[in-house]
Amino acid sequence: MSLSVRVIPCLDVANGRVVKGVNFQNLRDAGDPVELARRYYEQGADELTFLDVTATVDNRSTTYDVVRATAEQVFIPLTVGGGIRSVEDVSRLQASGADKVGVNSAAIARPALIAEIANRFGAQVLVLSLDVKRSDRTESGFVVTTHGGRTETDLDAVAWARQAIELGAGELLVNSIDADGTRAGFDTELIALMRSNSRVPVIASGGAGRVEDFPPAIRAGADAVLAASVFHNELLTIGDVKRELTDAGMLVR
């Protein structure tokens, strides 16, 4: 695990606006991505994740102008995902201000993409985004989905994570679709399972509702915690979360 815990706000973007739903469904407008990025940077976010949640569904590239405008407002690492299908896409995103890229659906369709990106840019640039559901069809009890959680695959989440790490993924962003937007807490069973099967950092995503939800995710094995709606709706600030983690005896940046 990392020495210090990272707190990462997530901007799920569709048509140039931040959106949020529950279990990846019924997306609603949550604000302007550039304004929110600036707010989180000023609050002390360690990193920022920008996910174009409809890029794959719409079969298009990420909205580069929004990425560029966001990058101009924040001076912390920016991870961008959604619609990335080639090393050329990564080059263009880096030119637009992205520090890291998140891949999901395209990597599942063509796993060699992971190695191509890692070999060209380094594993530290590549985040494997896993949109995971509970399932009795897989050995681990968790299955991977694509297209923003809309399409269920036959991939066991743990087996796929292991394969992706071998191919060059430098970090795992583990999104629990079952917990997403529910504000009922992170799926600590899923986090612990991924931690025990990963030699790279694990980012926990999905389910944050109260400051008390964050320490259990770290105890379960997460190196970083990611949240969206609780920050967008100003229920919590980055500072609130960092104070709770510090009070729980965890080192924050």
Image (cartoon, rainbow, N blue to C red):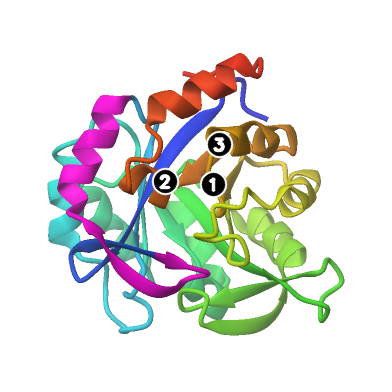
Q: Which residue is mark 2?
A: 230
Q: Are marks 2 and 1 in contact (CB under 8 Å)?
A: yes
User: 28 and 17: which one is in front?
Assistant: 28
Query: Which amino acid, by three-letter code, is at mark 2?
Result: Val
Q: Quadrant of the N terminus?
A: top right
Query: What x and y, as percent, mark residue 196?
Result: 81, 45
Give above or below for 130 relative to 8.
below
Q: Is 86 positioned to the left or the right of 190 in the image?
A: left
Query: Which amino acid, by three-letter code, is at mark 3?
Result: Ala
Query: What x and y, as percent, mark residue 221?
Result: 72, 37
Q: Are marks 2 and 3 in contact (CB under 8 Å)?
A: no
The answer to whether residue 49 shows anywhere in this view is: yes
Give above or below for 151 relative to 82.
below
Q: Secondary structure at mark 3?
A: strand
Quadrant in the rendering for residue 130 = bottom right
Q: Which of the two discs, 3 and 1, labels the residue nearer the N terminus?
A: 1
Q: Secondary structure at mark 2?
A: helix
Q: Which residue is mark 3?
A: 224
Give above or below for 12 relative to 15.
above
Reply yes or no: does residue 72 show up in magenta. no
Q: Which mark is residue 208?
A: 1
User: 177 and 229: which one is in front?
Assistant: 229
Looking at the rendering, the stretch of residues picked out in magenta corresponds to 21-43
Q: Give how far apart the Cα atoms at labels 2 and 3 are.
A: 16 Å
